Image (cartoon, rainbow, N blue to C red):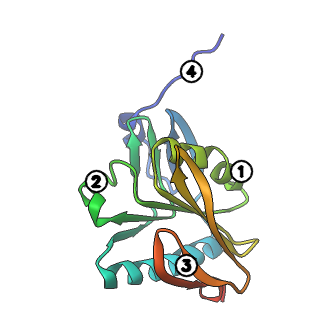
């Protein structure tokens, strides 16, 4: 019988700064390589779009990875983009965001798609992240989920040449062409 080792934040902060992305999911270590340039370009465009909207309306702060979201002592994630509304600003600390951000955004890659759509969606729901977006470069889509009754439920999808808004930003019109020029 094997014994499962549960890692904590203390173990996490002792990991090397070697260019890999480390996360803890319920004490289990997940490691991915640094994202490629197409991924980073897309994340950068999305960050700029959200940051301008949030800043001009005084809604809170937007962060781009790597930033630690410390959901518990055994669950630390690094979403690609994170929005923290002013009502949650006390969660920001020198270590990162200590608790559930308002919005976590993950951009799919071949190595993370199954995780982002599966266990990470459930992880965010369990830790009461109110909004979750999955950005799919292959499908050229953004899927929005909203926390309802303890689960993250589909709340909208932009794809192709769509123009629209996604929660939690009803006043932000997102043109798919802005993300995929």
The CA distance from mark 3 to mark 1 is 25 Å
Q: Quadrant of residue 59?
A: bottom left
Of marks 4 and 1, which one's residue comes earlier in the chain? 4
Q: Is residue 131 left or right of residue 118?
A: left
- Residue 32 x/y as whole percent: 60, 51
- Residue 169 x/y as whole percent: 46, 74
The CA distance from mark 1 to mark 2 is 29 Å
- Residue 97 x/y as whole percent: 34, 54
Of marks 3 and 1, which one's residue comes earlier in the chain? 1
Which mark's residue is nearer the viewer, 4 or 1?
Answer: 1
- The residue located at (64%, 75%) in the rendering is 38
The CA distance from mark 4 to mark 1 is 23 Å
Tags 1 and 2 in contact by the CB under 8 Å rule? no
Residue 66 versus residue 3 in the image, above or below = below
The CA distance from mark 3 to mark 4 is 43 Å
- The residue located at (32%, 85%) in the rendering is 56
Which numbered dot is residue 4?
A: 4
Which numbered dot is residue 165?
A: 3
Q: Quadrant of the N terminus?
A: top right
Mark 2: secondary structure: helix
User: Which residue was labeled with disc 2?
Assistant: 91
Which numbered dot is residue 114?
A: 1
């Amino acid at each position: 019988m094997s014994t499962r080792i549960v890692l904590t934040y203390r173990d996490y902060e002792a990991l090397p700064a070697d260019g890999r992305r480390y996360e803890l999911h319920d004490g289990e270590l997940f490691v991915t390589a640094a994202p490629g340039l197409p991924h980073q370009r897309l994340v950068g465009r999305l960050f700029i779009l959200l940051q301008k909207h949030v800043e001009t309306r005084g809604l809170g702060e937007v962060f781009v990875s790597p930033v630690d979201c410390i959901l518990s002592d055994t669950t630390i994630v690094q979403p690609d983009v994170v929005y923290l509304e002013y009502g949650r600003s006390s969660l920001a600390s020198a270590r990162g965001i200590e608790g559930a951000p308002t919005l976590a955004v993950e951009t799919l890659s071949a190595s993370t798609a199954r995780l982002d759509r599966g266990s990470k969606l459930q992880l965010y729901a369990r830790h009461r992240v109110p909004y979750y977006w999955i950005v799919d470069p292959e499908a050229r889509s953004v899927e929005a989920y909203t926390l309802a009754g303890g689960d993250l439920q589909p709340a909208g999808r932009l794809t192709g040449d769509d123009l629209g808004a996604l929660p939690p930003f009803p006043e932000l019109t997102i043109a798919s062409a802005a993300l995929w020029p």
